[in-house]
Image: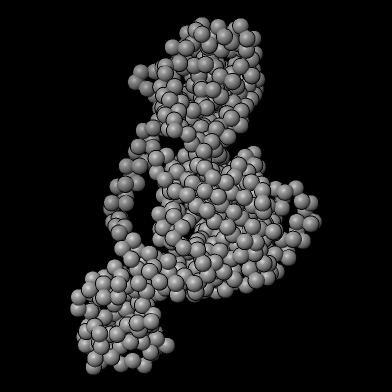
Amino acid sequence: MGKIVLKSVRKSFGDVQVIPSVDLTIENGEFVVFVGPSGCGKSTLLRLIAGLEDTTSGTIEIDGKDATALPPAKRGLAMVFQSYALYPHMTVRKNIMFPLKMAGMDIAAATKKADAAAKVLNLTSYMERKPGQLSGGQRQRVAIGRAIVREPAAFLFDEPLSNLDAALRGNMRLEITELHHTLKTTMIYVTHDQVEAMTMADKIVVLQAGNIEQVGSPLDLYNHPANVFVAGFIGSPRMNLLTGADAQAMGATTIGVRPEHVDISTTAGKWKGVVSVAELLGSDTFLHVNVEGHGSMTVRAGGDVNLRHGDTVYLTPQDAKVHRFGADGKNLA
Amino acid sequence: MARAASPRRKLLTTLAAWFVALLIFFPVLWMILTSFKTEASAVASPPELLGASWTLENYVEVWSRSDYPRFFWNSVVISVGSTLLGLAIAIPSAWAMAFVPGKRTKDLLMWMLSTKMMPAVAVMIPIYLLFQQLGLFDTKIGLILALMLMNLPIIIWMLYTYFKEIPGEILEAARMDGAGMWSEIAYVLTPMALPGIASTMLLNIILAWNEAFWTIVLTTTKAAPLSAFIASFSAPQGLFYAKLSAASAMAIMPILILGWFSQKQLVRGLTFGAVK
């Protein structure tokens, strides 16, 4: 079991209110990602769930029981930190066995569990090494191993892949997703990387300034952003957001169109512009176009498009795919 | 960018370092030389060096006239005891100050350190009377308590500095893993801060070993350590420099040897966290 319910949770540090009030339900077995820009309060929210910070008000329920006042160890949760937070003086085996030792489990049973976790995480041949002798990816796997052996109600991940290089990050992303499929345990994952959020989550919680902007599945957020912030934050490259006469003509204050929903032509179209940068990815080409009256817009074109810096192009949005936002920033659809 | 030093510059720096080291060490060196001279040679003016009469007589006499092993043992018990007791109190205190600081933690640390600036003589009478009335006068436990309390601010300050270097996330991980406060201190914090704790321990043993004011004021015979042993050679017959030097050399030798063998540890501990 691993259902977590936050009811009117608030957090202030002195006079600074970090989380104004959050209500959220995380169902058992869900992979939930908290995403938002730096300083939006996503890590604070995770730490509140973990019990590493005290709530200013509100309640946190884990599996139907009020856990607001419980210390971290009593919540039945396991956490994986950005810095791995391994015990540098202990071997991999002792690191993984540490939570079991704290729980008073006998050494034989604890060793068996640690070995099983190591097998799942391909750590068997590193058990007698110390964290300093491991690579970043191996260290993160040890941290995950230490979390797995506790058989927690939920796993909490605090930007666990931020310290890894791009290639390793991709691999670990897959490993964590596979782990979720195997264990079927609730996972709450904090990241500022919306690609991680989109690829891993069952449910994404977008945060800004401590407020939840939108909760939904990755595609739900991508296709139906609730407001301008979510529209601009989810998706890579970012959605093009335009104001002025073009927006007013569509009965909106701001309109948004994703790079793949803009048609490009060298002869005619709605907006005239000049290509400033062409990013060739092989499968796709991202064109950054300076459009008269709107500034820079991003367009996704095919990998074989033959456009370069300085070429004049014409852009036309696909009307059915244009998102309209009102003066309050909310989606008008 | 680091600048490579020229050989001439390197030589000058080395000579300057040797000169400063010799200047600092000179009183100890002179004392050791004096301890091997006759009394007449020790007080000769101008001071004799090459032409002095050398002898081991001072050591023989000091050894035979006093119970050196007893003084030595008292010094060991008092300095090690006060350091261990101090660490037992300071480790949890420094943990609290480093990881769960309150609004006034910094002020508290400053206040603790300020007590070290108080002249000991200002509280001599009350402490003397307290020791008399509590039955702690001339007892090893009394001196252990006195020296522990005197050095506690330094121990806490040093440990606080070392603990601050330990990433808070590791302790939070321990908390998530089910460790309570004592388990966190015993299994995670202490092993990680071991180099710092070891150098704090060494430094405090040295401070306690060298402490002369309280050890002389609060003891007579039973609990007197080596500082009192030295003092006993300065009276009442007058000053016998050669014998006094021999007694002093015998008193500082154990701590000098300890310092020599642990100098790497001491320097590492004292510069801990200075360079990342």
| Residue at point 68%, 70% (across, down) | A182
Position in image of residue A151 (x %, y %): 70, 58
> In the picture, residue A68 is in which quadrant?
top right
Q: Quadrant of the N terminus of chain B?
A: bottom left
Establish if B76 lies above or below B189: above
| Residue at point 51%, 32% (across, down) | B156
Position in image of residue A50 (x %, y %): 58, 51
Establish if B87 lies above or below A256: above
- Front one among A278 and A185: A185
Task: Report the colour scheme.
Answer: one colour
The total of numbered circles placed on residues is 0
Task: Please identify the residue farthest to the left as the structure is shown.
Answer: A292
| Residue at point 44%, 33% (across, down) | B103
Establish if A155 lies above or below B90: below
Position in image of residue A16 (x %, y %): 40, 44
Establish if B162 lies above or below A295: above
- Front one among A273 and B253: A273
Query: Is residue B127 in view?
Result: yes
- Front one among B174 and A197: A197
Report whether A20 appears left or right of A110: left
| Residue at point 50%, 68% (across, down) | A197
Position in image of residue B137 (x %, y %): 61, 11
Query: Is residue A84 in view?
Result: no
- Front one among A187 and A59: A59
Report whether A163 appears left or right of A318: right
